[in-house]
Amino acid sequence: MKKISVSVRKLVEFVMMGGSIDSRFAGSNVMQEGTRTHQRLQASRGDNYEKEVYLSIEMQVEEYVLHVEGRCDGIYRNENQIIIEEIKTTARDLNTVTEQDYKTYWAQLKMYAFIVCLKNDLDKITVHMVYAKRDSKNEKTFEKKFELNELHMFFEEVTKEYISFQEQLWKLRNARTDSISKLKFPYESYRKGQRELAKAVYKTVREEKRLFAKAATGIGKTIATIFPSIVSLQEGKQEKIMYLTAKTVTKMVAEDSLRLLIEKGLAIKTVTITAKEKICFQEETICQKEFCPFADGYYDRLKEGIKDILENEGMMDRGIIEQYAKKHQLCPFEFSLDLAMFADVVICDYNYFFNPKVRLQRWGDFHKETILLIDEAHNLVDRSREMLSSTMSKSVFLRAAKEIKGLDQEVYVKLKAVNDTLLKWKKELLVTNEFVFDDKPSQLIDVLVAAIEACEAWLVRNPSGMAHQEILKAYFEGQDFIRISKVYSERYKTIVTLFKSEVLVKLACMDSSVAIRESTSKAVATIFFSATLHPLGYFQTVFGGEEHDYHISVDTPFDPAQIKVFAKRISTKYQDREKSILPIVKVIKEVFHSEKGNFLVFFPSYEYLSLVFEAYEKYAAVDSIETLVQLPMMTEMEREAFLEEFYPEREGTFIAFAVLGGIFSEGIDLKGDRLNGVGIVGVGLPRISLERNVMKEHFQKKGQNGFDFAYVYPGMNKVQQAGGRLIRSEKDTGFILFIDDRYFHSKYRDLLPPEWQNFKEK
């Protein structure tokens, strides 16, 4: 007989769900205030009152044993009667609250009442539903009496619907298990090195470890990580897979791999989470029922939407989610988040796991059974630092203070205090435009906390109207800054930047390794994989690697004869930029103009690219060379149009100019004759900045080579990614041209893949 365990709260919330999405400001202290209100009321109840009472029951419902448990707020035990009490806090005027409101709360209370009746052999019971104001000591109590038979009927009604849905999930789970037992690798054979990677992933998952996998471009990393992870599902703790990506392109590659497995017979449910601003059906994203029909009554329709899509779809990508969201009048973003709870595989951005501001809080229950697959893991280094950093600006608080002046004197004074503190810094430290503190700015944080508390109280009282947007912006910026200040440690620096009337203060995370280690330790197993996870020691350090972690390095599966590698001695260091322009133009002309096909030339910055392209254009015109330049902030349609220009069997010469580390330097597949050669100008080092220099000093003090950690390794990683666009299959051929004299030094040459190191000088 199958056993189902569920909490009272989750049971009734699923069955009784209803209402609308409402993203209106509620404040950050609602939970704390609610807890304090509960504790205050419970303490006032007297000696015959027992608080936070654990209740549970097991009953056979059809062919299932249902275990239901929960913790009710309190029970009065007198000689003649037992009274169950639930306390709910609210910001509403208590005079407007009726007995008919909040059906879910009453359902929860009735479930507790039923359990207590059975445990105490009662035929009837009295219950109290108490509503308490969070910002006062006012409370309102509704008293009701229930017969055991009435409660029993209610229990059967609720559990019947819940079990019906669980049966649907059981069928899906059984179909998944059966299909996995028959699943075979979806290709006729493994590529060279692919089987070794798949075995390493499977071993890592089974042994609940972490794996650092450097696997060369073209090996088929995506299917080599997804396939063994799926095979391992339900063999141990593993129940779900979270596939984390940095870019839309890599999401699509993961979807293609899963789609292929589904076509081969795998019965699995996958969900892709698309950013809210991209998938929202409305012109303006305002998640309130007054502004959005998909938010209005969302929870009234959600259950049917979930049942429908799970019954009929396996691959729930953006298009499918949008289709069912429109069918059931649901917000597509929230729908994808709710579907993720029932999916076997979730494909999403790093943010949804690592970023404290946006990570999937509801996924927390599944961490202990989740396999993490972190694609293009080299991107996580800088992304995680930014997730764990926070910046506040003087102008935001000055603007908010000006808007609130005359509306609320207390809020104005406290916002002005933040502005005045930053202004004082500006006057005192005007000797330089940037400076660094080892410690967090406690004086600023003190006035900021006071301002944010005042803003929060004002926003609760004023959900819209004059100054609302400015106060809201200051609130969220300040709230994030305070959040980061609470985890500030020796891994942080405070960086202050002055320009014109602006003051920017950044709590900059130098080293996110501890946070990454803590986050990934919650999962069953974690696989960091990338073609450029080199040098391995660097990535193990910045990702919080430990001695017992596994690691594997898989070399290219392709014949070295498929690629020719050249290098040209030209200094591209910043001080030599001007005099490097014409030599670079000359080498592009000499190398690329004599070839037919499609070519990509990468530069370390838009500025450098523009200088070279301006000098090069006339030569392209003379030789009838087609050209295209990557632009900053391209839309998805513009990106697709850019890539469409790389069509096969081109009779002439086409050269596209792009930026290292940009959208076209990784994650794109231009197979066959779509790409015939790649040029890479420079060694990809990030622009010298105060923050990078502070990072350099941080790692230097920790016994590492600080310059390499802050500049060289991130730069050469971009070089490897860009060069990796060339050979994507067994039939691809072409050449790479490195343009920089530093490639002739062993320090940089040794950071290239082995098959690129024996280049010829041009």
Image: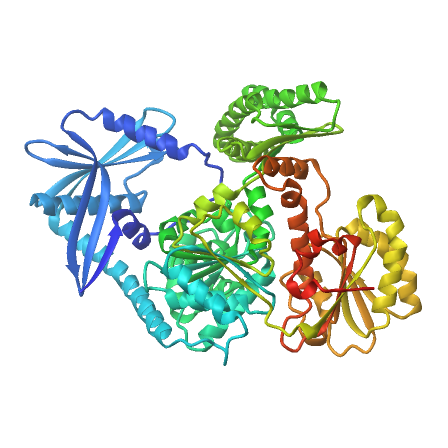
| Residue at 29% in and 43% down | 105
Front residue of 291/222: it is 222
Front residue of 678/709: it is 709
Which x, y percent locates residue 247?
59, 57
Residue 625 vertical placement versus 100 (above, below) = below
Question: Going by the image, does 411 lie left or right of 739?
Answer: left
Q: Which quadrant of the structure image shows residue 662?
A: bottom right
**Is residue 2 in sight in this rendering?**
yes
| Residue at 42% in and 51% down | 548
**Is residue 288 in sight in this rendering?**
no
Question: Going by the image, does 712 lie left or right of 55?
Answer: right
Instruction: Tally the marks.
Output: 0
Front residue of 88/357: it is 357
Which x, y percent locates residue 187?
50, 78
Where the C terminus falls, by quadrant?
A: bottom right
Which x, y percent locates residue 66?
20, 57
> Residue farthest to the bottom?
188
Q: Which quadrant of the structure image shows residue 89?
A: top left
Residue 145 vertical placement versus 293 (above, below) = above
Which x, y percent locates residue 240?
39, 60
| Residue at 38% in and 31% down | 32
